[in-house]
């Protein structure tokens, strides 16, 4: 049964099996990094942050809603700059991921669900279909979760953000 591909996968899992449902490779793959030859290996701190994000937010969501596709996870600073991400992006800390559900994805419904499940979300932004249709979600390593829910939409050709659900900040730390 053992072949080269299986071998490579088991090595990857040995260093980065994330939570109950995810692999580290889902959070580090980046077509931009591959195309531009950029290293997108997370720092130990970012890896720890990803563990928190998965354990506290993504595993519970996966359990409730089935398979989740990570469209952007960790971004090394050079990768974030290459895709013109925000200079303060939590993706660079391993604290954020963008996702879509594999089955019947609807970004607003996912955001509403994350709120209804009372998960310790730091920030959740759901994007309307014409700005990507994905959900951005973060979990802070320092435990100071802002509980912020925003909607992103396009207006006059620009991305705008509006409060979707009133923020309820809470203290919640991942102690893995
Ligand atoms: Zn994002």
Image (cartoon, helix red, strand yellow):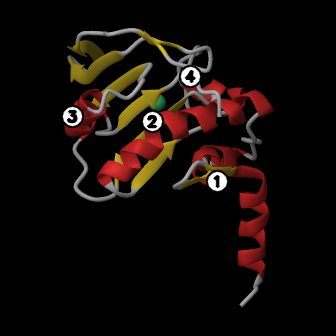
What x and y, as percent, mark residue 120?
42, 24
Secondary structure type for disc 3: helix
Q: Are marks 2 and 3 in contact (CB under 8 Å)?
A: no
Q: Which residue is mark 3?
A: 108
- The residue at the far bottom in this view is 1
Name the residue: 47% across, 47% down.
70
Q: Are marks 1 and 2 in contact (CB under 8 Å)?
A: no
Secondary structure type for disc 1: helix
Question: Is the distance from the Cβ of mark 4 to the nearest ligand 1 atom less than 8 Å?
Answer: yes
Q: Which mark is residue 57?
A: 2
What x and y, as percent, mark residue 173?
57, 20
Q: Which residue is mark 4?
A: 90
Q: Which residue is mark 1?
A: 25
Name the N-terminal-most of marks 1 and 3: 1
Name the N-terminal-most of marks 2 and 4: 2
Q: Is residue 130 above or below residue 15?
A: above
Within-10-Å neighbours for mark 1: few <14, some 14–19, many 20+: some
Q: Is residue 147 or residue 30 the one in the foreground?
A: 147
What x and y, as percent, mark residue 31?
59, 50
Question: Is the distance from the Cβ of mark 3 to the nearest ligand 1 atom less than 8 Å?
Answer: no
Q: Is residue 12 left or right of residue 87?
A: right
Q: Is residue 111 left or right of residue 17?
A: left
Mark 2 → mark 3, Cα distance in angstroms: 16 Å
Name the N-terminal-most of marks 2 and 3: 2
Q: What is the quadrant of the N terminus in the image?
A: bottom right
């Amino acid at each position: 049964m053992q072949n080269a591909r299986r071998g490579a996968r088991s090595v990857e899992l040995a260093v980065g099996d994330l939570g109950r449902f995810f692999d580290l490779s889902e959070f580090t793959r980046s077509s931009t990094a591959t195309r531009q030859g950029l290293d997108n290996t997370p720092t130990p701190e970012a890896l720890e942050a990803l563990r928190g994000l998965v354990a506290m937010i993504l595993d519970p969501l996966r359990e409730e809603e089935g398979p989740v596709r990570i469209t952007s996870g960790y971004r090394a600073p050079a990768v974030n700059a290459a895709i013109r991400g925000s200079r303060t992006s939590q993706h660079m800390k391993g604290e954020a991921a963008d996702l879509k559900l594999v089955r019947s994805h609807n970004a607003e419904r996912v955001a509403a669900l994350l709120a209804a499940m009372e998960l310790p979300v730091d920030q959740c932004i759901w994007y309307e279909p014409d700005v990507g249709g994905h959900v951005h979600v973060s979990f802070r390593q320092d435990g100071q979760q802002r509980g912020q829910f925003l909607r992103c939409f396009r207006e006059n050709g620009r991305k705008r953000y509006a409060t979707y659900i009133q923020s309820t900040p809470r203290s919640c730390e991942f102690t893995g």
